[in-house]
Image (tube, helix red, strand yellow):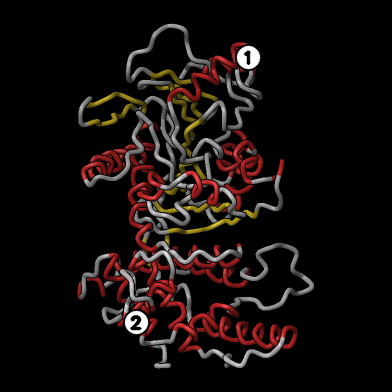
Amino acid sequence: MVQNQAQKVSTGCTEVKGHGARSYSPELEVDSTSGDSNSDNCCLEAGDDQRAGETGNCQNGGPPGSISTTQAEEDGWSDTLQDITVAPYNDTYGPIQRMPATATCMDFFQLFVPDNAIQNMVTQTNMYAKKYQERFGSDEGWRNVTAAEMKAFLGFVTSTSVHRCESVLSIWSSGFFSNRSIALKMSQARFEKILKYFHIVAFRSSHSSHGLYKIQPFLDSLQQSFGCSTFRPSQTQVLHEPLIDEDPVFITTCTERELRKRRKRKFSLWVRQCTSTGFICQIYVHLKEGQGPDGLATLKIKPQLHSMVAKQLCQNLSGRNSIIFTGPSITSLNLYQEFEKQEIYCCGLLSTRKSDCTGLPQSMLVNPESPQQRGQSRSMMRGNTSLISWYNKGHFRFLTNAYSPTKKGVIIKRKSGEIPCPLAVEAFAAHLSYICKYDDKYSKYFIFHKPNKTWQQVFWLTISMAINNAYIMYKMSDAYQIKRYSRAQFGERLVFRLQREGLMI
């Protein structure tokens, strides 16, 4: 089963490259997929572990937490390799709820943002407006928002993803991003009034203890709809930090000032994503509570936090024989062993700078002095867990209990041809290429409206993810066979449907 899976992803990896996606296949120059993060998906340069290995030689022979050769032998690490087998994955993946062929884009979107969620936004927005005016004085231009207006309001903000305008107010301008066809649905003055008072939760309850209380009910509802009630993921899934608020082109063209602004974001977000479809199955939002040592930058060197994130994202996978791919900040022996007890298997890239190397043999984490040939690898094993060191213009290390270290694979490069590697390396490269491809597609739904408040930033980000999942559900339904909308067309039709619910004001 595992071997067949790897053969499938090998083919997929070649196809991904053929369509121009960013390549995760080692040479592993992995492009950043998170603007403010330097953890899992950021540029894993070959020199990282080289420098770490040299530093380790100057100290105890390896990174903190690693163990000497004698200790490794005593703890069961051995050069003797054996085959392992992951139990078959019996679940079928795809939509659980069968949608009719007549289903519209709005119907798929409302699988994740139903009418009751929109009605709650109406109620809370009106409550907040009333309380605000009681405190600061009446607003003569305000009247209570309706459900129809709220849908139109969501449509206006969502349209910034379809038309790529940097400000939603550009819709009513006379410039390049103006859009008279939708501007007539609602006046700019009315839109700005709704934007001023828009709320998911108007008031803090006595039980609220964190900064996301204003959006938590919506997040809980979204988590449930992303979960097994709507869609079953495939056996292979990835934990990573997705693109947050800009498309891949922006990452390479933004100015230093824009970079500094992006670093001020007060939250970080991880997802568990199906590698076969791109469906986002689970999200986890972590707030930056303060500056200094507890700031977001510190999270990159906190394996205990990332381990906790991984457990949260995988809490519903116990007993399913899923295979989870992880980046360096999550990859660790202790986490993998804990997951294996729950019949969750893993394969991850290991970094001596970013990973928790506790319990791993130093001899595998320090670069050898003798020159290496491209494709050369060495493995050690403890129980069902393998630690692999593989050379390809630099040293790359992988930890896995999902793939047999005795099985061989290849990385296919256009110029270099086939580069031999262990099966785990081939599988990791292929599946991360899939996620890279889906990130490129998911970026089509980035909402460019940039509010200052953290809860609103998280809200519009999760709305973008809901549209992404809605399109995936649509594409796997009978409705796609009737009207084969592209991602862009689906987004445009959704905006039209939302605004159609609005009123002429």
Q: Judge from the rendering whether residue 218 lies leftward or rightward of residue 84; answer left or right.
A: right
Q: Amino acid at mark 2?
A: Ile
- For the residue pair 4 and 255, the one nearer the viewer reads as 255
Asked if residue 448 shows in the view, the reply is yes
Residue 294, position in %: x, y?
A: 71, 44
Residue 447, position in %: x, y?
A: 43, 65
Q: Which residue is mark 2?
A: 182
Tell me the element at label 2: helix
Residue at the limit of the structure toward the top, as seen here: 370
Q: Judge from the rendering whether residue 384 lies leftward or rightward of residue 296; answer left or right.
A: left
Q: Nearer the viewer, mark 1 or mark 2?
A: 2
Q: Which residue is mark 1?
A: 68
Query: How crowded is the residue under tag 2: few (<14 C-alpha within 10 Å), some, or many (20+)?
Result: many
Asked if residue 90 shows in the view, the reply is no
Residue 121, position in %: x, y?
A: 57, 81
Residue at 58%, 90% (x, y): give it. 142
Residue at 59%, 12% (x, y): give it. 57
On residue 358, which mark appears? none
Residue at 23%, 44% (x, y): give it. 15
